[in-house]
Image (cartoon, rainbow, N blue to C red):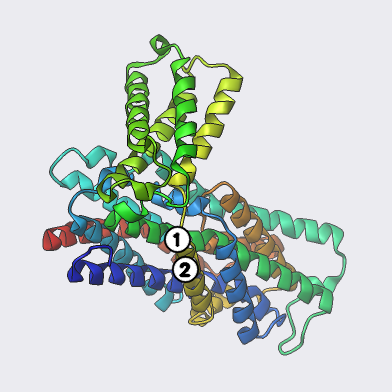
């Protein structure tokens, strides 16, 4: 397999299976939030609800794009972390996956709504921080802190946004929908009016679809991280992209950058500018007269990825710095060429997307009861009303959908459980919340990052020592 030894091939397969298992757990851990509302309002039978949600999760991954997946990959600069020893890549992905699975499985077992996104980000950061303890000069560059800040902000704000918007949504409902039945507790065994059921079916479906679109992409990003770390020569760049088209994009970036006055740049920016020129020249030399990456030696293909990463990322930083003396039209053209250049590195094979779609879809249909019970019964002191279920689902679907559009990983669990809490508060204030459940969820939210950072960092150093 790809010229790997039997031992490496087995470890590669193990890593891929663990990535699928992580996404499988994600299915019954996070998607339980989506089906809790339709189950607890008698709008859909549990078995029908989880199959319905599972199918829409599957579809969400298939048609969700890869912006979030690339956000996950870019948290760890793969050009820094990939080296000549494939066992180092194995140690990296094993530590990441094992730590994320341990925390996710543990919180599910105790019925605690905890964020798979939070877990994964913590595990990735733990590995990046662990590089500080290795010999060499990797340390400070082993975490993409700019991307980590954006991701952390999205995870921090999601529960606050979910809570606040659900209160606003309940106010809107009360203002425009005067039918009192929507604000009453469902009668056990009795189905609600058809219009309410249709609203809840729609909101459950949109949350499930956007969950697949956002969380499913995290699984795609995980597998791409595995493939790039262990088999950089085969998966570092998209073989289907014409090298000469990227050659043209990189040429335009270089020409536009040469128009800038370098004397206006700060010392750090001048180094970035020089880096852009160096890697642009190398890319041109390596791809001269070649139309496919398969025409480039396997050992040299990862350098093409590194060239594109260095050119695009440094150019983006220079644009953001504000000292690049170019016209507005030149900046606009630069951004277009950057986006076009990234096509060759921001991709995922269709088999990866399908594999994650199946894992997430199947996971949705199994093991959902523990989290559903917590969400449906233990957040508020009263049984969830139709309006509360709908408002929480609408807020979650909008939040997750917007995050996916901007390529940001966001927590379905945080958005929906905080939305339910907000809808409960909107009815009778803070006294309508079950304090013990809220404390447990908040504690899990606070502990997820530090626990997974320590766990993944420790496991990485251990596996690196064991595997050499």
On residue 356, the disc is 2
Find residue 448 and report its image quarter. Answer: bottom left
> Would you place residue 254 above or below residue 125 in this image?
above
Q: Residue at x 30, y 67 (%)?
A: 15
> Would you place residue 175 above or below residue 355 in this image?
above
Between disc 1 and disc 2, whose residue precedes?
Answer: 1
Find residue 279 and report its image quarter. Answer: top left
> Would you place residue 324 above or below residue 130 in this image?
above
Q: Quadrant of the C terminus?
A: bottom left
Marks 1 and 2: CB-CB under 8 Å? yes
Secondary structure of the residue carrying tag 1 is helix
Q: Give the percent coordinates (x, y) of residue 380.
A: 60, 71
Q: Is residue 378 left or right of residue 122?
A: right
Q: Residue at x 73, y 72 (%)?
A: 200
Q: Which residue is mark 1?
A: 220
Q: Residue furthest bottom?
A: 189
Q: Classify mark 2: residues with Cα within 10 Å, few (<14), some (14-19) or many (20+).
A: many
Q: Give the percent coordinates (x, y) of residue 231.
A: 29, 57
**Residue 2 visible in the shown view:** yes
């Amino acid at each position: 397999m790809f010229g790997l030894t039997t031992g490496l091939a087995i470890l590669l397969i193990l890593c891929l299976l663990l990535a699928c298992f992580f996404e499988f757990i994600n299915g019954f851990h996070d998607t339980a939030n989506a089906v809790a509302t339709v189950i607890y309002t008698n709008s859909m039978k549990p078995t029908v609800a989880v199959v319905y949600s599972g199918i829409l999760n599957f579809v969400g991954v298939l048609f969700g794009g890869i912006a979030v997946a690339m956000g996950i990959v870019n948290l760890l600069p793969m050009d820094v972390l990939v080296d000549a020893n494939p066992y180092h890549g194995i140690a990296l992905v094993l530590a990441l996956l094992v730590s994320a699975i341990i925390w996710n499985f543990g919180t599910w077992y105790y019925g605690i709504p905890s964020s798979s996104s939070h877990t994964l980000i913590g595990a990735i950061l733990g590995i990046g921080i662990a590089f500080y303890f290795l010999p060499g000069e990797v340390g400070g560059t082993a975490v993409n802190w700019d991307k980590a800040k954006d991701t952390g902000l999205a995870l921090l704000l999601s529960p606050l946004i979910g809570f606040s918007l659900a209160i606003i949504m309940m106010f809107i409902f009360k203002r425009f929908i005067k039918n009192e039945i929507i604000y009453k507790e469902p009668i056990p065994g009795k189905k609600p009016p058809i219009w309410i059921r249709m609203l809840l079916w729609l909101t459950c479906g949109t949350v499930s679809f956007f969950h697949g679109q956002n969380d499913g992409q995290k699984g795609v990003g995980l597998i791409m991280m595995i493939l790039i770390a262990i088999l950089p020569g085969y998966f570092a760049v998209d073989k289907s992209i014409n090298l000469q088209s990227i050659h043209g994009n990189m040429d335009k970036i270089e020409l536009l950058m040469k128009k800038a006055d370098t004397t206006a740049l700060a010392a750090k920016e001048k180094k970035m500018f020089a880096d852009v020129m160096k890697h642009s020249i190398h890319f041109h030399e390596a791809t001269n007269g070649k139309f496919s990456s398969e025409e480039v030696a396997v050992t040299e293909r990862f350098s093409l990825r590194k060239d594109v990463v260095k050119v695009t990322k440094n150019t983006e930083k220079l644009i953001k710095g504000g000292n690049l003396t170019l016209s507005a039209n030149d900046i606009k053209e630069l951004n277009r060429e950057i986006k076009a250049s990234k096509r060759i590195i921001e991709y995922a094979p269709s088999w990866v997307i399908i594999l994650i779609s199946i894992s997430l879809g199947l996971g949705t249909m199994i093991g959902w009861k523990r989290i559903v019970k917590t969400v449906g019964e233990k957040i508020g002191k009263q049984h969830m009303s139709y309006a509360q279920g709908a408002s929480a689902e609408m807020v979650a679907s909008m939040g997750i959908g917007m995050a996916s559009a901007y390529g940001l990983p966001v927590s379905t669990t945080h958005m929906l459980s905080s939305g339910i809490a907000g809808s409960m508060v909107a009815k009778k204030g803070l006294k309508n919340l079950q304090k013990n459940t809220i404390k447990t969820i908040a504690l899990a939210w606070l502990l997820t990052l530090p626990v997974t950072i320590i766990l993944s960092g420790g496991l990485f150093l251990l596996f690196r020592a064991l595997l050499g």
